[in-house]
Image: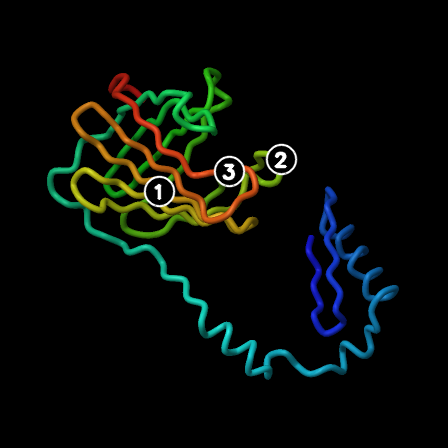
Amino acid sequence: MCFVTPRENIVIAVNASFKSMARLQVLLDLIYEELLDAKEIQQSEDLQDDPRLQQTIASISSKEPEIRPIPAGVPDLHLRTYGLSDNDNPQGLNRIGFRLRDSKLSLLLGYGREEDSEQLLELDFTQPVQTRHRFHKDLSMPLQEVVAYAAWLDKRTLRLNLYYIETPYVVTYTMTFEGESIDVQFQINVSFHLSDYRASGRLMNKKL
């Protein structure tokens, strides 16, 4: 948690693991009671009327990924699995599997040799999908709420945009297909321990 109050010239950074939000609220209450004058803060100027804040908010733009029609000539990915080299990427992603049904795409990401290391992500080419997906959060890999977009940029390039709700992560997978080969680019907006990478692989079989 990072608590910042510029008016009081105070920054509080806390690294802890709480089992519930109730514990976090106790911590916030202590900060207000022991370090801040709660009454003075409540009577301070409403930040909603601060022109500097409103100007900053107006300057922030977040454009949703475009929903695109599926172009003619895209590869038939249904029930295909591609193997990637573990040495090509720091996350150890070693296989990607696809299952297609109408506009829906099921993506299987494999990070090891065991079945429990596989993660399934549901997407739809006609609309964003809000689902749960296991991804990095601090030092763990919990299930998180994510909004996922899928779109073909052209007949060889598939792009996936993932917006994780509980963290600031925005992840983009760009996959380019050429014959039986695949090129995967991973990009993340911000992280202390994850980095962008590029990996290549080949078709393993046609069974997911």
Q: Nearer the viewer, residue 100 or 183?
A: 183
User: In the displayed structure, would residue 51 be above or below residue 162?
Assistant: below
> What is the x, y in percent for residue 50?
59, 82
> Which residue is identified by label 3?
194
Q: Residue at 29% of width from left, 41% of height from top? A: 104
Mark 2, residues whose alpha carbon is within 10 Å: few (<14), some, or many (≥20)? few
Q: Nearer the viewer, residue 5 or 179?
A: 5
Q: Amino acid at mark 1?
A: Leu
Which residue lies most toward the left here? 72
Quadrant in which the C terminus is drawn: top left
> What is the x, y in percent for residue 194?
51, 38
Q: Amino acid at mark 2?
A: Leu
Mark 1, residues whose alpha carbon is within 10 Å: few (<14), some, or many (≥20)? many
Q: Is tag 3's residue or tag 2's residue first in the polypeptide sequence? A: 2
Secondary element type, mark 1? strand
> Which residue is identified by label 2?
139
Res. 108 image quadrant: top left
> Which residue is identified by label 1?
123
Q: Residue at 34% of width from left, 43% of height from top? A: 160
Q: Residue at 23% of width from left, 40% of height from top? A: 157
Give the distance between the C-alpha atoms of the residues marked 3 and 2, in whole angstroms.
Answer: 11 Å
In the rendered view, does 30 fall on the left or right side of 162?
right
User: In the displayed structure, would residue 135 be above or below residue 61?
Assistant: above
Give the distance between the C-alpha atoms of the residues marked 3 and 1, in whole angstroms.
Answer: 23 Å
Query: Which is in the foreground here, disc 3 or disc 1?
Result: 3
